[in-house]
Image (cartoon, coloured by chain):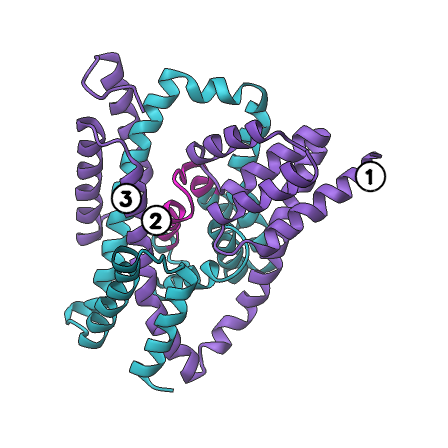
Amino acid sequence: MILELFLGFLRVGCFSFGGGYAAVALIREVVLSNGWMSEEMLSYLIAVSESTPGPIMVNLATYIGSTQAGVLGSLVATLAVVLPAFLLILGLMAVLKRFMGNPWVSAAMKGLKACIIGVIFATGLEMLWTNCVPSKSPDLTAIVLTALLAGIYFGCREGFHRKLSPIALIGISALLGIAAYGF
Amino acid sequence: MKKPALLWELFHVFFRVGLFTFGGGYAMISVVEDACVDRRGWITRAEMDDLVVVAESTPGPIAINCATYVGARQAGVVGAVTATLGMILPSFLVIFTISKLLDRFLEIKLIASAFRGIKLAVGILVLDAGWRLLRRMKKDALSVTILAVSLTIMLGVNLFALRFSSIVLMLTAAGVSLLAMKLGWKGGGKE
């Protein structure tokens, strides 16, 4: 169990090019394939991570480690997700700039980055789909709320040039959730 | 500065960075810059700029890259470990506590309803993250093709519930990109 956590999050730490949400795509894959957590709970957690201090992938690793195997699990998962970035910077510090400028490295990176954008889009679409059409029948409330939230988020940015922070969107969505599903 | 004092300083500076950066990523760059470049002169502005570029193209959280680099520059491997642990500790403590409580909170109807709404926002945030990366990507034939093929494959994998790791896909994409450079295809090699 501990070893699985370590290897799973080490993989996330090694391949999460492109920031926190790239890690979300990978973590979702690792978590769902190991059956560590339901899709729904993972969505909740991503929101919690976005609204608490620290990098999203570190937060997710700590939480999943803790629920799977207590304190030890959370320590192992957290260290595993951080280890690749730590070793890479430490090992390559002196030559980092030249390393990044190497044509082979940058060519490989280019392919990796284009690919992970595709993976992130697929993850986002899949999440929206399972939210709006859970168990093969469309959930009208969820569809209306999703459209409303997307309208608010992108409307603010494109229409009024005022970027709504992710935390603000999460706050609004919580209020809408309470309004729609009762308290 | 004496070494224990320096290590303590590294630890508490990065502890503060870790404590006050919500959502991680780009928000923390300006916090690190203020603490390490402007106030303490631990690294130069040029180093900071390079570090951000490197952090963007390496895996893992940007915050970790910064902490490791600054710590190592000031006090070697011990410094790197100290700064990185300082950076992780606040979120570790907060999330560990939440992990013990969240299930119980979700039994409260008000909170359960709030999270049902929040779940919908998360899907939008993930798509938006992809969109922002897409806008910064150089749109040559090679990148666009790799992106489109990856998206299609991953949607298919999800649709048919296949067991397939996106890491295989990423390594293949890197290979294709290297091949493109070797063969001198249009858009190959340059980033």
According to the picture, the residue beneath numbered tag 1 turns out to be B4
Q: Quadrant location of residue A106?
A: top left
State which region is magenta. A10-31
Image quarter in which the C terminus of chain A is found: bottom left
According to the picture, the residue beneath numbered tag 3 turns out to be A119
Determine the residue positioned at 47% across, 59% down. A49
- Badge 3 and badge 1 both on one subunit: no
Of badges 1 and 2, nearer the viewer stands: 1
Query: Which of these two is toward me, B92 or A168?
Result: A168
- Badge 1 and badge 2 both on one subunit: no
The residue marked by circle 1 belongs to what chain? B
Of badges 3 and 1, nearer the viewer stands: 1
Determine the residue positioned at 36% across, 81% down. A178
Identify the amino acid type marked 2. Answer: Ala
The residue marked by circle 2 belongs to what chain? A
Specify the label residue A103 is tagged with: none
Callout 2: helix, strand or loop?
helix
Residue A91, x across and y down, in percent: 58, 25
